[in-house]
Image (spheres, rainbow, N blue to C red):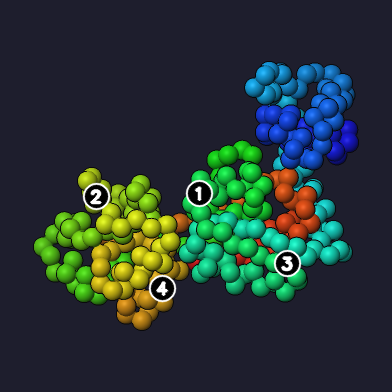
Amino acid sequence: MSLSRMRTFIEVYRQRSISSAARSLNLTQPAVSQHISGLEVVIGRPLFERSPSGVKPTSAADELAADIGDKLDVAEAALSSARARSMDIEGVLQIVGYGGFLEEILSEQLLPLLESGIKVRLHIGNNDLITSLLLEGHCDLGVSAQPVFDTRLKSEAIFTNKVLPVASPSVAERILAAEKYDEAIRSEPLLAYNLELSLIDHWLVKNRISVEGLVPAMVSQDLRSQRKLLVKGFGWSVMPEFLCREQIAKGELVELPSPIGTREIQYYLLWLPSALRQARVAHARQSLLNQLDYDVGS
């Protein structure tokens, strides 16, 4: 059972499409079909049910994918990393992720890659855009604050950080002087990452503060713009500690009380397994995993 046939099978299995797998593998559709037919002969059972809309895996395909899928990804990544150590890995690396994390955390970890000759292009996007750009092959690596749910992508946790409720000293003083803390904080303007209040509602719920009817005064997917407004004395927010640590140390922001406790946010490195066949991408992925120590509460 050849490595190329196994890779073809995994690509068809993940994409549920022979034509999509062919494009991803840079093969013709007949070649992909031939690889699958050859595997079916070896195994003695059909792997896919064909239909006009694509292919549906059989139970035999599910079993085979479970047996070899992750192992194949690891093997190919190891081979690509080995090639990267012995060949020219110069090129352009496209990375998409949350702006604050890319600029405040990831950027300095890119130095070894830049020094090796790899050119890096950073793109800002939310989780939906990150997923789309990776699946469509427009970006090589992604960074998300959400675990990956699309089975075509792989991810690994790379960074964990506390999220803190923060405001300027003047706003904090006004909130703390109020008779009822929960009512006072809800009465101040709220700055949020999105309308779903993804960071904020978890903190509110954990601290038993009602989220009902809470509408942000401002929504921005770059928390650094919110940080500027907070420092100016407008509103409050909940953000990762790495984005407000310096401002708290300078006294420009203060951490608001968390009656029950704070929570943590995890960041993940995302990639399309087939992208690791490129030595440049495999090398960059491993470099970033090595550079970014995954340390809970760091």
The amino acid type, in three-letter code, at marker 1 is Asn
The amino acid type, in three-letter code, at marker 2 is Leu
Give the SS element for disc 4.
helix
Which marked residue is nearer to the observer: mark 4 or mark 3? 3
Q: Which residue is drawn at 67% across and 29% down?
A: 16
Relative to residue 127, is residue 167 depicted above or below? below
Upstream in sequence: badge 1 or badge 3? 3
Quarter of image, res 217: bottom left
Q: Which mark is residue 118?
A: 3
- Quarter that holds the N terminus: top right
Quarter of image, res 291: bottom right
Question: Is 258 left or right of 144, judged from the image as shown?
Answer: left
Viewer-nearest residue: 235 or 287: 235
Which marked residue is nearer to the observer: mark 3 or mark 2? 3
Residue receiving disc 1: 127
Q: How far apart are marks 3 and 2 (CA)?
A: 45 Å
Upstream in sequence: badge 4 or badge 3? 3
Relative to residue 16, is residue 248 depicted above or below? below
Give the SS element for disc 1.
helix
Question: Is 214 left or right of 158, judged from the image as shown?
Answer: left
The amino acid type, in three-letter code, at marker 3 is Ile
Residue receiving disc 2: 214
Residue 169: percent from left, percent from top: 25, 75
Q: Distance between the residues labelled 4 and 3?
A: 31 Å
Residue 101: percent from left, percent from top: 51, 63
Q: How far apart are marks 1 and 3 (CA)?
A: 25 Å
Q: Is residue 233 visible?
A: yes
Q: Which residue is drawn at 71% across and 62% down?
A: 92
Mark 1 and mark 3 residues within 8 Å of each other at the beta carbon:
no
Residue 157: percent from left, percent from top: 57, 54
Viewer-nearest residue: 22 or 115: 22
Q: Can residue 156 be seen in this view?
A: no
